[in-house]
Amino acid sequence: MIPLSWPLLLSAVVFVIGLVGVLVRRNALVIFMSIELMLNAGNLAFVAFARQMNSLDGQVFVFFVMTVAAAEVAIGLAIIVNLFRLRESVFVDEINLLRG
Amino acid sequence: MTLTLFAVFAAVLVVSSLSVILQKNPVASALFLVLSFCSLAGIYLVLQAEFIGMVQIIVYAGAIMVLFLFVIMYLNLGRDVETGMQILVRRGIGWAIGAVLLAEGAIVIGRHAAAGPASSPAPGIGNAQALGVLLYSRYLFPFEITSIVLLVAMVGAVVIARGRAGPAARRGSARAAAPARGPEAVAPPASTPPGAAAPGPDGPGRTGTGAR
C-alpha cells in the first residue's frame, strides 16, 4: 500500500514545477501548459485523498476540474490566437496594453 | 509491486514536467506534456481510480493536447529567444520562489506523515459504475451545470477566435494583402482568383477572411 504522503509530495512537486513555469517562461502557450500542470497536481491530490478516505467524491471533483480545464483551454487558446493576430507575438512581456 | 510502479510513474512524471518548462521549442514542450499526462494516468491507475485514469488519457492527452499542438503549429512558432539580464533575473526569482514553496510543502507533508488507507475498497462494483451512480445522484446538479460551462466555452471560443471587424482586423487584412500586389509568383493560394486578389486595404469580406 502506498502511504498518503507520497502522492501528496508528488503533487506538490508537480505544482511547483508548473508555478515556476508560469513565472519563468514568456511564451503564453508554455505558460498555459504550466497552468495545466498545476491543475493536474491538484487532481492528483484529490485522487490521493479519495483513496485515503475510501470515498469517490474526490474523483467526482477531478471530473469537474477536468471539465473546467477543457473549457479554459478552449477559451484561452482562442484568446492567444486573437492576440497573435493583433500583435504578431505570443510573448507575454510584449503584450502590455488592454487596448488592442 | 504497486510501490515500484508508483515510483517509476512518478519519476517519469517529474522528469517530463521539468522538460515541459525547460524546452525552448513549444512543440517539444507539448509532447513532453503528453508524456507527463500519460504517466499521471498510470499513477491514477495505481491509486485505484481507473475511470479517472482513462478520462485523463482521453481528455487531456487526446483532446486538450491536440488543441495545443494545433494552435502551436497554426501560429508557426519557432524556438523561444530568451536572453538578456531581465530574463535571468526573472528566472532566478521564479526558481527561488519555487524552491521555497516546495520546501514548505515538504515540511508540512513530512510532519503529518500518514499511512496508507486502512482498508481496500469493497470489491464487486466497478469504479466507473460507482462514479456514474454518484454523478447522477448526489452530484446531478453540478453535472448539469458542467454542460452549461462547456456550451458557454464552445460559443465563447468561436466568438473570440473569429476576431472582430474593427480597425485592427482591417490592418491585418492590409498586411496580408500587401504581397498580393507583387508579381504573379507570390500570389496567394489557389482559392483566391488572381483578378480579385487585391481589393485594397478596406475591401470588405474576401480579404478579411483571407487574413484569418
Image (cartoon, grey):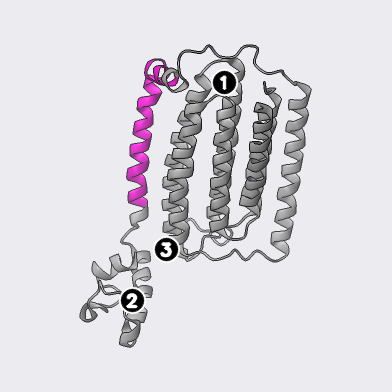
Q: Which chain is indicated by disc 1?
A: A
Instruction: Check if residue B62 falls in the magenta segment.
Output: no
Q: Percent from the top left, x then y, of residue B102?
A: 73, 37
* Magenta stretch, residue numbers: B131-160
Q: Marks 1 and 3: which is nearer the front? A: 1
Chain letter belonging to callout 3: A
Residue at label 2? B177
Residue B165's disc number: none
Give the number of the mark in front: 1 or 2: 1
In this rendering, is residue B158 above or below B104?
A: below
Q: Residue at x 70, y 66 (%)?
A: B84
Label 1, residues with CA under 10 Å away: few <14, some 14-19, many ≥20: many
What's the magenta bit mostly, secondary-structure-wise? helix
| Foreground pick, B93 / A61 | A61
Tell me the CA gap for discs 2 and 3: 15 Å
Quarter of the figure with residue B109:
top right
Element marked by disc 3: helix
Between discs 1 and 3, the one toward the N terminus: 1
Disc 2 marks a residue whose amino acid type is Ala
**Which chain does the residue under circle 2 lie in?**
B
Q: Is residue B112 left or right of residue B125?
A: right
Tell me the quarter of the image containing the N terminus of chain B. top right
The number of discs equals: 3
Classify mark 2: residues with Cα within 10 Å, few (<14), some (14-19) or many (20+): many
Residue corresponding to mark 3: A85
Q: Mark 3: few, some, or many residues within 10 Å (few <14, many ≥20)?
A: some
The answer to whether mark 2 and mark 3 are in CB contact below 8 A is no
Task: Check the picture and name the quadrant holding the C terminus of chain B.
Answer: bottom left
Q: Measured from the top left, where is residue A35 in percent x and y?
A: 56, 44
| Tag 2 secondary structure | helix
